[in-house]
Amino acid sequence: MGVRSGFHDLGFAKVDIARACRRGFPEVIYSAGKTSEDIFKIAHQLIKRKQDLLLTKLDQDKFSFLKKKIPRLKYNPRAKSAYLVQKEKVKKGLVAVICAGTSDIPVAEEAVVTLEVMGNKVLKFYDIGVAGVHRLMHHLDLIKEANVVIVVAGMEGALASLVSGLVGSPVIAVPTSCGYGASFDGLAALLAMLNSCSPGITTVNIDNGFGAGYFASLINK
C-alpha cells in the first residue's frame, strides 16, 4: 500500500488523489456495492489531503456508519448523496435543474447536490412536465437565464426536447426509470432523448443525476 504515481493503493481500491488537479474536482465515491468500511477508507484518503468529498448512491445505514467517523459529513436522503466541503466556494454560473414529475426528484436532487458541491449556482423547477406545459411556461424567463439546463424526465422523456426548443443554452437530458411497463425502466426515455430532433441536447445514462451535474459544472467553467 502507499502512494504511487498520483494514486493511493489500498489494495481493494486505488484512490485517484491527483484527479482534483486534472479535472478540478476530486474523485467521487460511487457507494453502491461497497461496504461501509471500504467507503470510509477511500474517503479518509481524500479528507486527509483536504479534498472535498462527494459520495453518490449512499443509503441511510451506510451514512449513519460514516457520520460517526466523519462528523462533518452531510447527507441529502432524497438524493442518496453525502458530501463534505473543505472550504466554502463562491458560487459561480447558473444551472437550472428541471424535472418532469415528483417521482423524478431523487435523480434531480443528485444533480443539484453535485452542482452545489462543485461550486455552481442552482435554480430548481420541479413537477413541470409536458402533461401540463403551462407549468413550464410559467418559469421560462428564469430558466432562460441559466448557462446550462438539466432536464430530468421519465415516462416518454419528451420534456428535454420541449425545453431545448425554447432556450438558447445547452441542455443535458437525464432519463429516469420512472414509468409503467413499456417504459422499460427508463429505456424508452433514454431512446427518446437520444433521438431528439432539437439540437443542443446531450444525454447521460438512466438515473445518472451525478453525471449530468458534473458535466454541467464543466460547461459552467
Image: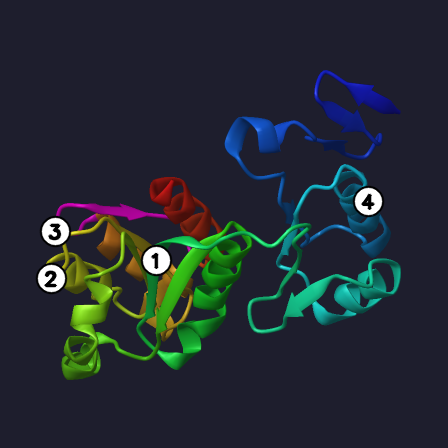
Total number of numbered labels?
4
| Amino acid, disc 4 | His
The CA span between labels 4 and 2 is 45 Å
- Graded by Cα atoms within 10 Å as few (under 14), some (14 to 19) or many (20 or more), the crowding at tag 2 reads few
- The picture places residue 172, in percent across and down from the top left corner, at 30, 52
Q: Secondary structure at mark 3?
A: loop
- Residue that mark 4 sits on: 44
Q: Secondary structure at mark 4?
A: helix
- Residue that mark 2 sits on: 166
The quadrant of the rendering that contains the N terminus is top right
Residue 100's place in the image compared with 63, above or below, is: below
- Residue that mark 3 sits on: 198
Question: Mark 3 or mark 1, which is nearer the start of the sequence?
Answer: 1
Magenta residue span: 195-206
Can residue 134 be spotted in the picture? yes
Instruction: Judge from the rendering whether residue 52 lies leftward or rightward of residue 143; answer left or right.
Output: right
- Graded by Cα atoms within 10 Å as few (under 14), some (14 to 19) or many (20 or more), the crowding at tag 4 reads some
| Amino acid, disc 1 | Val
The CA span between labels 4 and 1 is 30 Å
Question: Mark 3 or mark 2, which is nearer the start of the sequence?
Answer: 2
- Residue that mark 1 sits on: 95
- Graded by Cα atoms within 10 Å as few (under 14), some (14 to 19) or many (20 or more), the crowding at tag 1 reads many
Looking at this view, is 196 or 41 the one in front?
A: 41
Q: Quadrant of residue 164?
A: bottom left
Residue 47's place in the image compared with 137, above or below, is: above
Q: Is residue 199 magenta?
A: yes
Instruction: Judge from the rendering whether residue 153 lies leftward or rightward of residue 79; answer left or right.
Output: left
- The picture places residue 5, in percent across and down from the top left corner, at 72, 16
Q: Are marks 2 and 3 in contact (CB under 8 Å)?
A: no
